[in-house]
Amino acid sequence: MLEPLEWVHPREREHKAVYRAYMFGPFRVFRGDDALGQRSQRREKAQLLLKWFLLNPGQPRSIDELIDLAFPAAAPDKAASSFHVAMHCLRRMLEPDLRPGEESSYIRRSSNNFYRFEADDEWWTDTAEVDRLFDQGRQSDSRGDAQRACFYYGQVVGHMNRRLLEDDSPEQHWLTPYRRRYQALQREALLRLVQIHGERGQIDESLEYAHQMLIDDPYNELAVITIVEADLAHGRLAHARHWISTFLDSLTRDLGIAPSHDLLTLKARVRQDLPHPPRAEAQRHLATTSSRAG
């Protein structure tokens, strides 16, 4: 997929949209400057359906599947009635001027009782934006455009500083695959930011993203190696010893994992106060650990 000929800054797409939905952190939807969906039992079910629609734009689902999503414990007759009430509430919430019997511009119902959500150019969601930005980052990465790749990957990480729909309870099992998917995108974006900035000699930037990696994955080998290598480069031997010894102890104590050859080699260098290796050698070292970073 090629980038559009006319480059548009990501924030411009967000600001131009009529509807804006934020899925990372608390769920929020705006039409213009107005927040939609004040809390009530009926609106909570409408919002639940909207969350599913926004995460699956254009994908049809049967009425039975949507009822199971929103009303899993209700009796069949009551569940069907409650579903139609929630759908009516959702249509009115999104389009308050919709006349009785008028079809929604966004929620489509087929003759065989399948529903789908059509998010046109009036809609902006942070989840769709993350998908777009990650794709653009990967395209730039494959072309060797490191500066633009870092911009897009950095935007991905910036959107995902909070968990997907963090206010939804852990019992919402339908969310699990979506959370795992976006967590994987975040990890890959952070990985490439650490690697690219390291290759360009931008130590501060590489360290920033290495520390972010450790927040999500405290056993990330690449992140710790990046931090220790930076300490060695700046002569902070005591700090380097602390990091490598603490990390190796946690691997053994918490995960029962034996240290890799790369980690043991780094530990030996730290203990012997060996100088920081040449940059090319250091980058080869980071490359060998990238497959274990996730």
Image (cartoon, rainbow, N blue to C red):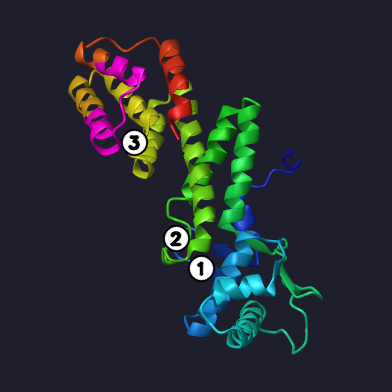
Secondary structure found at label 1: strand
- Image coordinates for residue 73, horizontal then vertical, percent: 51, 78
Q: Is residue 95 left or right of residue 203?
A: right
Q: Earlier in the sequence, mark 3 or mark 2?
A: 2
Q: In the drawing, what numbered circle is on residue 219?
A: 3
Residues at circles 1 and 2 in contact by the CB criterion of under 8 Å: yes
- Image coordinates for residue 232, horizontal then vertical, percent: 28, 18
Q: In the drawing, what numbered circle is on residue 60?
A: none
Secondary structure found at label 3: loop
- Image coordinates for residue 47, horizontal then vertical, percent: 55, 74
Disc 1/disc 2 C-alpha distance (Å) = 9 Å
- Image coordinates for residue 33, horizontal then vertical, percent: 56, 72
Q: Residues within 10 Å of mark 2 (few under 14, many from 20)?
A: some
Residue at coordinates 53% horizontally, 39% vertically from top-left? 153
Which secondary structure dominates the residues rendered in magenta?
A: helix
Residue at coordinates 70% horizontally, 70% vertically from top-left? 62
Instruction: Determine which residue is flagged by label 1.
Output: 28
Quadrant (top left/top right/bottom left/bottom right) for the N terminus: top right
Q: What stretch is highlighted in magenta?
A: 246-267
